[in-house]
Image (cartoon, grey):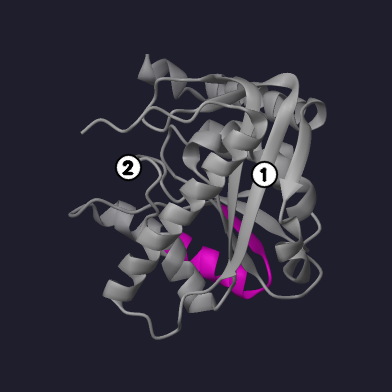
Amino acid sequence: MKGLLRRPGVQTFLSWLLASYLKLILRTVRWRHVNADCVEPVLSGPSGAVALFWHGRIPMCLSVAPHWWRKAGSKALISPSADGEFVAQALERAGFPAIRMSSAKKGDAAKARAAVAGFREALNFVGGGGALIITPDGPRGPNEVIASGALQIAKRTAAPVFLMGMAANPALRLDTWDQVMLPTPFGRGVVVWEGPLHVPPGAGEAEIAALGADWSARLSAATRQAEALVGAPPPKPAEA
């Protein structure tokens, strides 16, 4: 089955299907934004930005598109894996070109080089004034835990970071590692914004780890707030 899903023709069809769904959800769900004023100075200014939301909320990611499209450039950070290909294609169709980057496993020199190249592209893009949208717990998890890569990009570019908690109701909740939420058309949706946050330029590994834990808690709290505002049930507790 994996081999079939990774065929170019199948990937193209899946990307069209996902892009069509993302656009449908943007246009038919009644979206409400809480504290979106916090991002206004960046949207109207020349500086870059990093924006974070959880991987399980990708199906509603276009809810924030009308805001970020006001920047000169907005891109999404997507894994270079074959499984991430149709997602990257779908986001490109929906108006968010992708930068392909993820961490590499030890001993895989080719993937390590690709990771370095993607990291440099992300730094140059944000440093040049672009807005980079990241699901910082993807593509493999653990769920709702921010990996250090997003914080390293923010540190090296001195870019402000914004957290975006998203939820919609009615919606299907899939039994996946990230508990994907699939909104249905003509429902209600909420995005709770928080920021700007910053990584100090001299932050070491311990401080970055502490910030990652704090920001993970904040992004989860914003997501739970969005769920409460639309009357959506909270996710299942993580298994011990």
Residue position marked by numbered label 2 in the rendering:
142
From the viewer's perspective, is 24 left or right of 222? Answer: right
Residue found at x 42% / y 43%: 138
* Disc 2 packing (10 Å; few <14; some 14–19; many ≥20): some
Where's residue 195, x and y in %?
61, 65
Residue found at x 65% / y 61%: 131
**Residue situated in front as seen by the camera: 62 or 110:** 62
Residue found at x 18% / y 54%: 107
Mark toward the viewer: 2 or 1: 1
**Residue situated in front as seen by the camera: 239 or 157:** 239
Main secondary structure type of the part rendered in magenta? helix
Q: Is residue 35 among the parts visible in the rendering?
A: yes
Where is the C terminus found, in terms of image quarters?
A: top left
Residue at the outermost bottom position: 202
Residue found at x 74% / y 47%: 33
Vertical placement of residue 238 versus 214, above or below? above
Vertical placement of residue 45 versus 95, above or below? below
Where's residue 92, x and y in %?
67, 41
Tell me the tag on residue 110: none
Residue position marked by numbered label 1 in the rendering:
191
User: Disc 1 residue type?
Assistant: Val
Magenta residue check for 89: no
Query: Cα distance, mark 2 to mark 1?
Result: 22 Å
The magenta-colored residue range is 117-133
Where's residue 66, x and y in %?
79, 48
Where's residue 19, x and y in %?
68, 29
